Image: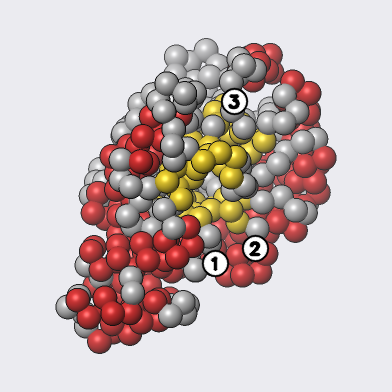
Amino acid sequence: MQKENIDKFNLSPELKAIAKKVVNGERISFDEGVLLFEQGELNFLGSLANGIRERLHGNDTYFNKNFHIEPTNICVFDCKFCAYSKLLRQKTDYDAWELSEEEIYDIIRGYNDQEVTEVHIVGGVHPKMGLHYFANLIKNIKEIRPELHVKAFTAVELEYMCRKAKVSYKEGLQILKDHGQDSLPGGGAEIFAEDIRAEICNDKCSSDQWLEIHQAAHEIGMPSNATMLYGHIESYADRIDHMNRLRELQDKTGGFNTFIPLKYRKGNNQMSHVGEVSVIEDLKTYAVARIFMDNFKHLKAYWPMIGRETAQLTLAYGVNDIDGTIDDSTKIYSMAGAEEQNPNMTTAEIVELIKQVGRKPMERDSVYNVLKDYSDFEPAAAS
């Protein structure tokens, strides 16, 4: 949004003051963030967010070539919103799984002839898969494919690993880094508000522990992502509180690559009575995130969670990254009723998705170095 465009919206004095701050590149406050959620109309929020996005990135829209591995869904924790984990169930249960090391290595080898650049490894918190088990796993993955970026383990998994191994977070992360781990995903953050967390995921790592683990990663030179689970029983103030804590840590460390709002899906969990928010609310959340989180360069829409069409819409509401090709059998979201039950897109499909809305598709690596400009791609030439 340009300064001269502010007046085309019928704004209250408070919203007009916020718009002027945003256009001038000034940081907005906690209360102003809540006000944007409560009173900001979607077109106004989208215009503000898109202005920031285009100032930072122009039309460049990022994706990467990645795949996911989920070692197990057997888990010691019992999150009420999760349709995925099986609380200490046995491997023989029909809907529980536990991959062997060789099965994991076979998945890695299965991509040897493909131009993937990242493997994303997260799963349930298995009581027998500890820090040293995973350190050895990563070392062997790197021996199979040395150039592959390993993004692995949520803070929830790491808190349990380090506690069981009796090491500090920084010591545990350094062990993983020394064995080849490159970055952390953003999962497990859910919502930081303690009263909400007590209702939906009371037995896993606290919000303070999540932040402490990511700070420790940044301090040893390991970048990470950040997420927020929205659209369940939280308030607008809870969302801004969550974003504010992330913004404060980013001020301190600068170690976050991107912020990823994750939509709550109600399928097959203990909170199925809680309805899902609308696409309008999705777009509003992305737009406010772009406006409020002024020290996060990248904002990602995770397309398997919200679907391809909604992900495409978010590109006009502050988003500049729609994740990757994700050629995989991910179940963590599909079991909860996510839009994409078998999430995978070819490079040609993801490039076309971006180009259809006038954006410029750019393949990136895991830390946003541009690998290839796909602006002039021909479908037959894309792989």
The x, y position of residue 178, in whole percent, is: 82, 40
* Mark 2 or mark 3, whichever is nearer to me: 3
Residue at (78, 23) in percent of width and height? 143
Mark 1, residue position: 295
Q: Is residue 227 left or right of residue 104?
A: left
Mark 3, residue position: 115
Q: Quick check: can you spot residue 274?
A: no
Q: Quick check: can you spot residue 24?
A: yes
Q: Secondary structure at mark 1?
A: loop
Residue at (23, 50) in percent of width and height? 278
Q: Is residue 129 left or right of residue 195?
A: right
Q: Secondary structure at mark 2?
A: loop
Please name whichever residue, 271 or 226, is drawn nearer the observer in this view of the structure. 226
Please name whichever residue, 185 or 87, is drawn nearer the observer in this view of the structure. 185
Circle 2/circle 3 CB separation < 8 Å:
no
The x, y position of residue 82, in whole percent, is: 42, 38
The x, y position of residue 211, in whole percent, is: 61, 59
- Relative to residue 343, is residue 209 depicted above or below? below
Please name whichever residue, 1 or 266, is drawn nearer the observer in this view of the structure. 1
Q: Earlier in the sequence, mark 3 or mark 1?
A: 3
Hey, which quadrant is residue 18 in on the image?
A: bottom left
Please name whichever residue, 163 or 174, is drawn nearer the observer in this view of the structure. 174
Rendered image: mark on residue 254: 2
